[in-house]
Image (tube, rainbow, N blue to C red):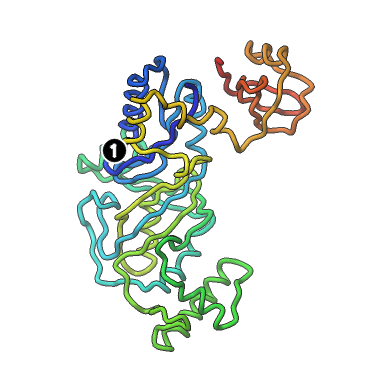
Amino acid sequence: MHGWLILDKPLGLGSTQGVSAVKRALRTAGAPRLKVGHGGTLDPLATGVLPIAIGEATKLAGRMLDGDKVYDFTIGFGEQTDTLDAEGAVIATSDMRPTLAQVEAVLPRFTGPIAQVPPAYSALKVDGARAYDLARAGEEVVLATRDVTVHGLALAADDAPPSPLASSRTRFGIHGAADPAAEALADRWILKQVQDDGGTDDGGTDAAAPLDHVTLTAHVSKGTYIRSLARDIALALGTVGHVTYLRRTRAGPFTLAEAISLDKLDELAKARGLEHSLLPLGAGLDDIPALSLTPDQAGALRQGRVLAGIAADDGQAFALLGETPVALVEVESGLARVVRGFNL
């Protein structure tokens, strides 16, 4: 029972509560007492992929924090809250509502390396105290700007209407630009042409219809706050907004395809079938190459010794003796040093 259970976290459940649910399931299944931890906090108001590490996999939980994440999220326009989500109190309002074309036109500004100010209601520490504790106590919280990367940002695929800009690019014979700034300039020109035509593109989409909300998909680096992204997108559109829906669809290598509900977790535990949904320890390391060991090499690594003469590229590798994980190692100039050893 050393590996990963991926929960499809329901609304209202905290990440630590998800860990507790897995611990209860392990007890129900009669499994040995093992360490359990999660691979990245997911807010109670968010749903989706929550990796739960069991046993020796807990040694890799920190790597999940460094992995990219993918989210579907909805921005509700017209109100900004102090928490930047539906849980908070309204602190600003606006009657302005953007159009779909305006939303599409502004997204390139938030793609790539960007700087953002985290929400006051976050787990970041200020002078040793959690920011959300200070904010709840009524203190003013000032957080430093941080650099993050948004690898992709677009209208959510499932329910996105036909894109005015996409079809209008074809209409005007524009097939992309060499850089985001040029593309944004082209999109603003397209938007003006569409509006001059009465707000309708050749596909019949009303490009000038005001939106109360929009749902986007974001592929982001570690440290990116979706609530801050939603706030900044709304402000760039001349209005205010907050997150009304947030679902994580991928965390590191794990997706919703592997995720199970709490009901399924309970069902598997009672049937003593948790192993059917347990992913191997190495599933959290599928982005790095495997390194096959001889028994002597495996023994040396288990003793914390450095291996010499390793024919592998520099960087991290997943060291295995047959199918048994031995260690996560760092290879440099033919030398392999243990980063994390596994007691298996």
Q: Residue at x 29, y 38 (%)?
A: 13
Report the residue marked by disc 1.
13
x and y percentages locating residue 91 in the rendered image: 22, 57
Left or right side of 240 for 179: right
Q: Describe residue 129's horizontal placement relative to residue 193 as left or right.
A: left
The residue lying toward the viewer, choosing from 68 and 185, is: 68
Residue 101: quarter of image: bottom left
Total of numbered circles in the picture?
A: 1
Name which residue type carries label 1.
Answer: Leu
Residue 33 versus residue 88: which sits nearer the camera? Answer: 33
Neighbor class of circle 1 (other Cα within 10 Å; few <14, some 14-19, many 20+) is some
Give percent across and percent down for residue 342: 56, 19
- Residue occupying image coordinates x 51% and y 77%: 167
Residue found at the very far front of the displayed protein: 271
Give the residue drawn at x 57%, y 22%: 340
Viewer-closest of 174 and 272:
272
Residue 68 on image: x %, y %: 51, 44
Pick the quarter of the image with the C terminus.
top right
Q: Name which residue lies at 46% across and 72% down.
A: 163
Q: What element carries label 1?
A: loop
Residue 40, image x and y in percent? 42, 36
